[in-house]
């Protein structure tokens, strides 16, 4: 009976040091999962940003102009021409006698998705969410990396002409000769740029010290503020998140399922297909633009509310340390101290158990020897 009681008592008090509570597991998940969560937020932001046509017009125009100027400088005057598309100077035409079609031209344009902003947002998020790096260095890094992304994207566009020219010289005046150019575009657009961006971030992370950086995360250093995920949530924050979800659902419904907007979109597609200009087409265009604008307004409001709810600005305390890091370290030390106490208690109980077993064995031996003497 004594052994059983000791065993039950040990089982109820001793906890293996490697065990983590569900709260601690959730905290670790938030630490390592904050970058994917942030990327989901910026993906949603980018999707609504580029839903209207030519949202990023100034950037598109700048890339198209540089594309045209550099292309003519590299491949000869007249090889590229710049013209308008939907009122913006974003249309580029390649010219060569080997290109297919009656005019021997290849028409392209810089869309908002081809402007490289998606890639800029992606790499900026990776840098901004990296721990152990000062805010000043992050801002400088984001500026440099966005510039590099702009240059890389422009280089990608400039390479279209020589790829198309080489294939069309081998197979002139055939639409299939443009296959190589489109294959290159698809490969870079779908996964090539992603690999380059991740490589850029990994190299930068290694350059600034990486995981081996001997740095006390509790120290603020020269930073006077930083953005962190909210630690303490109450009912008003959950209500705000519920409103965010409602706004996003309403925005998505307005551009995907709203019957009036869908009819306007179908009419607008027919007008573009047949190059029709009429009052009906103008009304359809106006209605579809209203739907897009409404969705954009709701989604922008939702993302702002979500960001203000999920993140907060933290300032260092009088000791020059981040309060959240001080609190985290204190909790971790408290947890380790508790585990040490449990280990010590477990060792004492184990020792007492062995003593009890030893005494029990000695009593049996004395009883047996007494019986033999009788």
Image (cartoon, grey):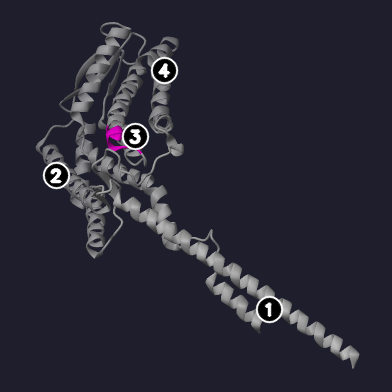
Marks 1 and 3, how far apart in space? Answer: 64 Å
Which mark, residue 123?
Answer: 3
**Where does label 4 land, which residue?**
177
Q: Nearer the viewer, mark 3 or mark 4?
A: 3
Residue 180 falls inside the magenta stretch = no
Our reading of the magenta stretch's main secondary structure is: helix
Marks 3 and 4, how far apart in space? Answer: 34 Å
Q: Nearer the viewer, mark 1 or mark 2?
A: 1
Marks 1 and 2, how far apart in space? Answer: 83 Å
**Where does label 2 land, which residue?**
290
Q: Along the horizontal axis of the image, is 22 left or right of 94?
A: right
Can you say whether 78 is above or below 85 in the image? above
In the rendered image, residue 260, in percent from the top left (x then y), is placed at: 18, 50
Dot 4 or dot 2, earlier in sequence: 4
**Which residues fall within the magenta stretch?**
133-139
Residue count near mark 1 (Cα–Cα under 10 Å), binned few <14, some 14–19, many ≥20: some
Quadrant that contains the N terminus? bottom right
Can you say whether 288 is above or below 186 in the image? below
Q: Nearer the viewer, mark 4 or mark 1?
A: 1
Determine whether label 4 and label 2 are within 8 Å by CB.
no
Residue count near mark 2 (Cα–Cα under 10 Å), binned few <14, some 14–19, many ≥20: some
Tell me the residue at 59%/77% (across/down): 8
Tell me the residue at 11%/37% (across/down): 282
In the rendered image, residue 99, in percent from the top left (x then y), is placed at: 35, 13
Marks 3 and 2, how far apart in space? Answer: 32 Å
Dot 1 or dot 3, earlier in sequence: 3
**Where does label 1 land, which residue?**
356
**Picture quarter containing residue 145?**
top left
Q: Secondary structure at mark 3?
A: helix
Dot 4 or dot 1, earlier in sequence: 4
């Amino acid at each position: 009976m004594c052994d059983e009681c000791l065993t039950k008592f040990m089982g109820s008090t001793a906890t293996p040091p490697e065990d983590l509570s569900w709260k601690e597991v959730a905290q670790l998940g938030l630490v390592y999962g904050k970058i994917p969560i942030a990327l989901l937020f910026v993906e949603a932001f980018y999707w609504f940003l580029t839903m209207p046509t030519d949202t990023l017009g100034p950037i598109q125009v700048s890339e198209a102009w540089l594309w045209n100027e550099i292309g003519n400088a590299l491949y000869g005057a007249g090889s590229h021409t710049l013209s308008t598309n939907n009122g913006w100077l974003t249309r580029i035409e390649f010219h060569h006698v080997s290109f297919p079609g009656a005019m021997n031209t290849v028409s392209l344009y810089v869309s908002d998705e081809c402007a490289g902003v998606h890639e800029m947002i992606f790499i900026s998020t990776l840098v901004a969410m990296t721990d152990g790096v000062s805010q000043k260095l992050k801002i400088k890094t984001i500026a440099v990396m966005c510039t590099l992304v702009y240059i890389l994207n422009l280089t990608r566009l400039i390479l279209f002409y020589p790829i198309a020219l080489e294939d069309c010289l081998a197979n002139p005046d055939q639409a299939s000769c443009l296959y190589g150019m489109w294959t290159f575009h698809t490969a870079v657009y779908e996964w090539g740029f992603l690999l380059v961006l991740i490589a850029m971030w990994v190299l930068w992370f290694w350059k600034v010290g990486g995981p081996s950086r001997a740095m006390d995360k509790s120290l603020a250093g020269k930073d006077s503020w930083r953005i962190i995920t909210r630690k303490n949530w109450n009912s008003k924050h959950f209500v705000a998140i519920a409103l965010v979800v409602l706004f996003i659902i309403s925005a998505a419904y307005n551009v995907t399922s709203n019957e009036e907007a869908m009819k306007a979109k179908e009419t607008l597609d027919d007008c573009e297909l047949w190059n029709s200009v009429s009052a009906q087409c103008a009304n359809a265009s106006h209605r579809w633009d209203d739907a897009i604008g409404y969705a954009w307004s709701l989604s922008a409001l939702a993302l702002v509310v979500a960001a203000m709810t999920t993140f907060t600005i933290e300032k260092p305390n009088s000791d020059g340390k981040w309060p959240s890091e001080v609190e985290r370290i204190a909790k971790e030390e408290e947890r380790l101290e508790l585990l040490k106490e449990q280990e010590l208690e477990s060792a004492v109980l184990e020792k007492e158990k062995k003593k009890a077993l030893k005494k029990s064995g000695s009593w049996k031996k004395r009883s047996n020897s007494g019986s033999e003497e009788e």
